[in-house]
Amino acid sequence: MNDTLSGRYYPPGSSAAEPATLRASGGLAIITLEESGKAKPFEIINMSDRLANIARKITLKGGGVFETADNEGVDRAFNQGGAFAGRLTKVESSLKYVAVLALLTVAALVGMYRYGLPALASGAANFTPSSVVSLMDAGTLSTVDKVLFNASNLDKARKREISGLFDELVMQAGQNEPALKLLFRDGGRLGANAIALPGGTIIITDQLIAAAKSDDEIAGVLGHEIGHVELRHSLKQIYRVLGIGFMVTIIGGDSGQLVEDVIAQAAVLESLSYTRKFETESDYRSAELMVGIGRDPFAFVELLKRLTNDDGKKKENGYNPSRHL
């Protein structure tokens, strides 16, 4: 190792550089200052990795630094030029290769977001402990009751009728986990709406019931929300938004603070929309349940038509099946 490297030497605690040379000798660096000719050995503490044509920095014991642009010389002097390192350096120094790698990285990230994250979210939703789902459900219900809904003004007889209809759908669905429960609320700013919470609680508003012209229309809405619970759309949506770290922590059992954070942000999560795929899956499930109990599976569609404009946008206080928890 007789390579002599030309560069600059920065004394400890100084930003003023002195022209110098470095010669490697048995793990030591012999620094020779060009102006004075003085030479001194130093123990090498650290050496920066090679990156394109960026100057290398060799940190010496005592705080001094030797800097050189002779990357090839450093590789030869310190045996840094292995086959893999050489190929990597060529790639790093080529704009064409860097551009290709950047495009491949972006494509991988897009693929992960488009396909990988939904797949992971689906798996995580299926393995989420029931205790965690129940905690999410209870906390979310508490939040939406504070910020979105008011107490229902529907008379008891009508509540019993709709609850009986709901029980028919639940029996047809055979849904046991999580257990399904129907609640009535005044819709407040949400107006005519229905939402499905992560743990099986389904809320229908007085305004939606008033807007329906038949029990079949109400049953269609309830069947749609049951579909969201059965297919765990709420959990999948939460996991998609909060990411892989949240999924791993929940499945691993260390969920206390994270679940509290989700509950605290329930009002924000309420504004999220299900994907079109989730909505279509719930539409099909609603139709299956309606046929199973002998009711019109298309009544739900008629209700949506009345509550939306011609361009498909939600009317004021109209039911929007893409807004749920």
Image (cartoon, rainbow, N blue to C red):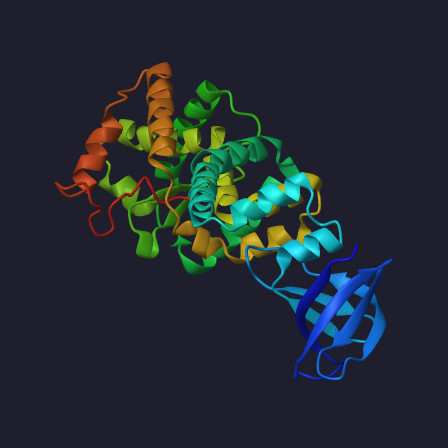
Please provide percent x and percent y for residue 129: 65, 36
- Residue 53 or residue 295, whichever sits in front: 53
- Up-down: is 33 above or below 93? below
- Up-down: is 96 above or below 64? above
**Residue appearing at x 41%, y 53% in the figure:** 151
**Residue appearing at x 26%, y 20% in the figure:** 296
**Residue appearing at x 69%, y 64% in the figure:** 5
Q: Is residue 130 left or right of residue 80?
A: left
**Residue appearing at x 62%, y 52% in the figure:** 258
Please provide percent x and percent y for residue 117: 50, 38
Q: Quadrant of residue 247?
A: top right
Q: Is residue 54 left or right of residue 291?
A: right
Q: Quadrant of residue 25?
A: bottom right
Q: Quadrant of residue 249?
A: top right
- Residue 245 or residue 9, whichever sits in front: 9
| Residue 261 in sight in this render | yes
| Residue 201 in sight in this render | no
Task: Tell me the quadrant of the picture where the C terminus can be found.
Answer: top left
The total of numbered circles placed on residues is: 0
Please provide percent x and percent y for residue 198: 51, 40
Q: Is residue 36 left or right of residue 116?
A: right
